[in-house]
Image: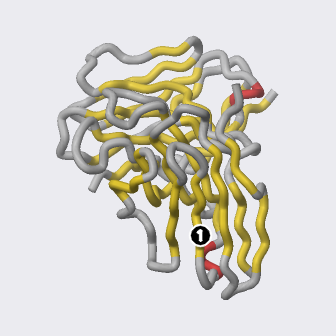
Amino acid sequence: GAGVSQSPSNKVTEKGKDVELRCDPISGHTALYWYRQRLGQGLEFLIYFQGNSAPDKSGLPSDRFSAERTGESVSTLTIQRTQQEDSAVYLCASSPDQRGTYNEQFFGPGTRLTVL
Amino acid sequence: AQTVTQSQPEMSVQEAETVTLSCTYDTSESDYYLFWYKQPPSRQMILVIRQEAYKQQNATENRFSVNFQKAAKSFSLKISDSQLGDAAMYFCAYRTYRGSTLGRLYFGRGTQLTVWP
């Protein structure tokens, strides 16, 4: 079966523009996560979805960042008025059921965002 | 908040030799999970091994094993018989067992492993 997919693979944008990053989770996975990976850093948690609700969005760095999810399917991370410090790889992961004792997170290949 | 520290930004090993990557973490919880992920240049995060904190036995997966010292809050990864394909960035990660942040992973900054032929 298909894994987690993300699009675009790479995105170059100008400072001040808005960008949308897309994540298609593995079919049937109810939990979805967004992480940010700056150059030379580990992954930082941004937001978690259970179905289409977001019980934990404490990692979103500012109100320029928002995310939504349609049912238990695709999720979109939107960054408004991009800044150079937003340049990073944005990784999405999904897992079968957040509420179980253990559910592996399966990661997508990420979107590399470059803000000029 | 939980923090994960990897003190070795870079490590290298000769093919067929053994290497150990270090990880320490800080938490006040008694139940949690610990993970090692591998990230090759393709950026795809791959789960290498996981450890449940309530288990005293160290996890093993083929050539990969961990040394879990709960009291010391230490979680090192040992790679035996290193192969060229093991070359990658390795991340240590923590996940809580219960509570409002259930599910989110806390990552260290990674260790870049080079394998020499």
Position above or below: A64 against A49: below
Report how many numbered discs are placed on residues in the image. Answer: 1
Pointer 1 residue: A78
Q: Indicate the quadrant containing the N terminus of chain A: top left, top right, bottom left or bottom right.
A: top right
Q: Element under label 1?
A: strand
Position above or below: A44 against B53: below
In the rendered image, the residue lying farthest to the right is B117
Does residue B50 show up? Answer: yes
Q: Position of residue A58 (x, y in %)?
A: 36, 63
Q: Quadrant of residue B63?
A: top right
Q: Indicate the quadrant containing the C terminus of chain A: top left, top right, bottom left or bottom right.
A: bottom right
Q: Position of residue A44 (x, y in %)?
A: 48, 57
In terms of depth relative to the viewer, which is nearer, A48 or B58? A48
Q: How is the image coloured?
A: secondary structure
Q: Position of residue A47 (x, y in %)?
A: 44, 57
Left or right of A50 in this view: A76: right
In the rendered image, the residue lying farthest to the bottom is A16
Q: Quadrant of residue A11?
A: bottom right
Left or right of A115 in this view: A26: left
Seen at 49% across and 25% down, the residue is B49
Give neighbour class at mark 1: few <14, some 14-19, many 20+ (Cα, 10 Å): some
- Residue type pointed to by label 1: Thr
Q: Chain of mark 1?
A: A
Q: Position of residue A18 (x, y in %)?
A: 66, 79
Left or right of A92 in this view: B57: left
Does residue B11 show up? Answer: no
Seen at 59% across and 80% down, the residue is A80
In the rendered image, the residue lying farthest to the front is A71
Position above or below: A50 against B17: below
Seen at 35% across and 40% down, the residue is B95
Seen at 67% across and 88% down, the residue is A16
Position above or below: A86 against B7: below
